[in-house]
Amino acid sequence: MSKLVYLVPLFPLLGFLINGLGRKSLSKTMVGIVGSGAILASFIVSLCIFFDVKEHGATVVNLFSFIRTESFSIPFAFQVDQLSSVFLLIITGIGFLIHLYSSAYMHEEPNEHFGRFFAYLNLFVFSMLLLVLGANYVIMFIGWEGVGLCSYLLIGFWFKNDNYNYAAKKAFVMNRIGDLGFLLAVFWLLFKLGTVTYGDVFANVAQLSTFDITAITMLLFVGAMGKSAQLPLYTWLPDAMAGPTPVSALIHAATMVTAGIYMIARSNILYTLAPATQTVIAVVGLATAIFAATIALKQNDIKKVLAYSTVSQLGYMFLGLGVGAYTGAVFHVMTHAFFKALLFLGAGSVIHAMHHEQDIRKMGGLKKYMPVTHITFLLACLAIAGIPPFSGFFSKDEILMAAYGKNPLYYYIGLGGALMTAFYMFRLYTMTFLGNFRGTHEQQHHLHESPSAMTIPLIVLAILSVAGGWIGIPDVMIEHGHQLEHFLAPVFAESAKLAEHHHLEASTEYMFMGVSTVAIIIVIILAVNAYRKYQDNGAENTGLGKVLENKWYIDELYDAVIVNPLNALAGFLKNVVEKSGIDGVVNGVGRLVGYGSRQLRLLQSGQVGNYILVMVLAMVVFVLIWFNDQTIMDFLSKIF
Amino acid sequence: MPIQYYIYLCLALFSIGIIGVLTRRNAIVVFMCIELMLNAVNLLLVAFSKMHHGAALAIDSTTKAGIDGQLFVFFIMVVAAAEVSVGLAIIVMMYRNTHSVDINFLNRLKN
């Protein structure tokens, strides 16, 4: 069965080709069926592979030789193991639901753009599958660049709007900064070990010096920072909201941002051997989690709140990776994929009903108009806030417990972030669904529940958000309850051997769970109470609120420190170096040739005698040059 | 006869030809000077050929080395005759157009 793994990325690729080439001739129904069907087919194959891996363990499927030189060879091979099969299920499963949802959400687009949209989506999923399946860093890098490209195409999908194009460019450039780090790490590995295949790298990791490992892991982490939107390269992700809402769901939940987590989880042995990098990752992750959470507290755009919550949740995942809780991080990727996809699709449903209004100050009271969206959104909020027994509780708890084992300070700061998460999510929920409607009468008149192609994915995702955490119940609650950990154990076995184990007392663990749950519930009640009767009185935020609303002025800071000096330098190069330097040289050459030609023209006098004279002189010169030879001189001197 | 005499004669003829081409303006005279140069070179060819043949005979009395050069001269003379007819035809055409055979009138291509 594992031999058929190439089918998994093949289906989306075919879907991309069919929809991309036939976007002008295919009907919308046809495009929807091809686009969604391709992902569904991949999902079915992924399921088979998952059970196969569960039964028979991991394999590497060699497809063909990709790059071969004398000193190294890079095969085009797929890594089929526990980690990649879990990611395959997340990507194709959630990807399929998002495709299904898109077929209804994007229905107002003209035929051609509808086809283009699905072609991009399929290409996106294809790239992500390649990233996850590749058995070496080079194949991963192909997928890595592919998702970067597709995010650019999809964020700028409505390319007639300049702001959206700007957001797309920003995403691309930010990702490129990270990609450079990734690429350098790959070259470093190739230089030191002569191979980039996972199996060989991890087996020969002992040959690397501590400095090499630290440098390589740091560079890889720079790549992950770009792709997974960590400080300081996170600013593209909130701007990526410019794309259609299903794209946001796809980028934030199933693909793209999880790439960094996957890559570090995949390279877990390297990271376990580089404690310095681990500390950096934990600190950056924690800082991002808190920082993004504070921004989310004051955002008024429904998608922006979700975007910052994604950045914040990714921070938790990196915290997990940094403290060595690789399973916890992957677990959180999974549960986060469920509830974040649900939140985005729910938000899309709201935006759809509100006729592209995204400001939560103009919503409210949608509970009675959109019952399915309301219930599913509420479940997702409970899941992300970390209320037991919803899925987010288990994964977040696992990460925070591991963080406590490493350093209690991590735990307390992380818990603070979790409380903020609960607050801003329920602020969002309350302002959107509770209270009175604050939009226009016309909007109120048109409020409606979304079609079933949109609500069915919501319901499926809601079930997953509720129950998805039950495969990872901590061992203190149920013996061998953490099925995911047992499943993933072979991938992280080497790291687990090296890492020191902290086992908390069961009673301590229960106490932490209890305290955090109670605190979160209190925060939720506070948030609901504070915003239930919200009325937009037009008052400006002051002090810290204003700073938070403006996202700590980070974009302005980047503009001032990086963008503007770069623009100034570019302006200098354009106006001074280009105009007087390079243009001067080019024009000078032209003028020189022109001047020379005018002088040479004088030779053409029209007098045949002159021409002959020049000819004879030239012949004499040539004769003198050619006959300037000893033997001929001897011969001539013999004659004369 | 020593080869030097031939070379002196050829040099003299060739130089006369060059000086004639450079100094005279009458197209027919220029043409004749060109012929003079051609024949100077032709003469040199046959002289060297004969010298080469003589040197070879001294070693082997049956050799034919150098004979082909003397034959070749005849071909050159035939070709030169053909060339003369073409050249004279051009000069006739020139005279019809300009009523002169002065080569300085042939500067119309310049403008």
Image (cartoon, coloured by chain):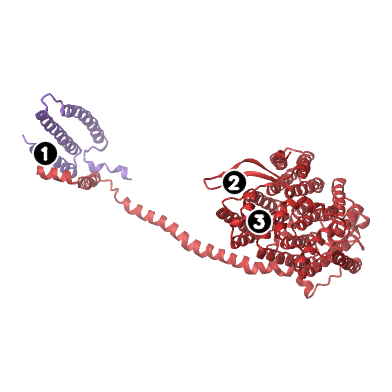
- Whole-percent x, y for residue A333 in the image: 77, 55
- Whole-percent x, y for residue A159 in the image: 70, 52
Residue type beneath disc 3: Phe
User: What residue lies at 80% left-to-right and 62% top-to-bottom?
Assistant: A305
| Secondary element at tag 3 | helix
Q: Which residue, given by chain and number where applicable, does mark 2 sit on?
A: A74
Please identify the quarter of the rendering in which residue A313 is found: bottom right
| Secondary element at tag 2 | strand
Is A268 on the left-hand or right-hand side of A347? left
Q: Which residue, given by chain and number where applicable, does mark 3 sit on?
A: A172
Q: Which chain is purple?
A: B
Output the chain of dot 1. Answer: B
Farthest residue toward the left? Answer: B1
- Whole-percent x, y for residue A507 in the image: 87, 66
Q: CA distance from mark 1 to mark 3?
A: 83 Å
Q: Which residue, given by chain and number where applicable, does mark 1 sit on?
A: B7
Q: Is residue A35 in view from this perspective?
A: no
B95, A540: nearer the viewer: A540
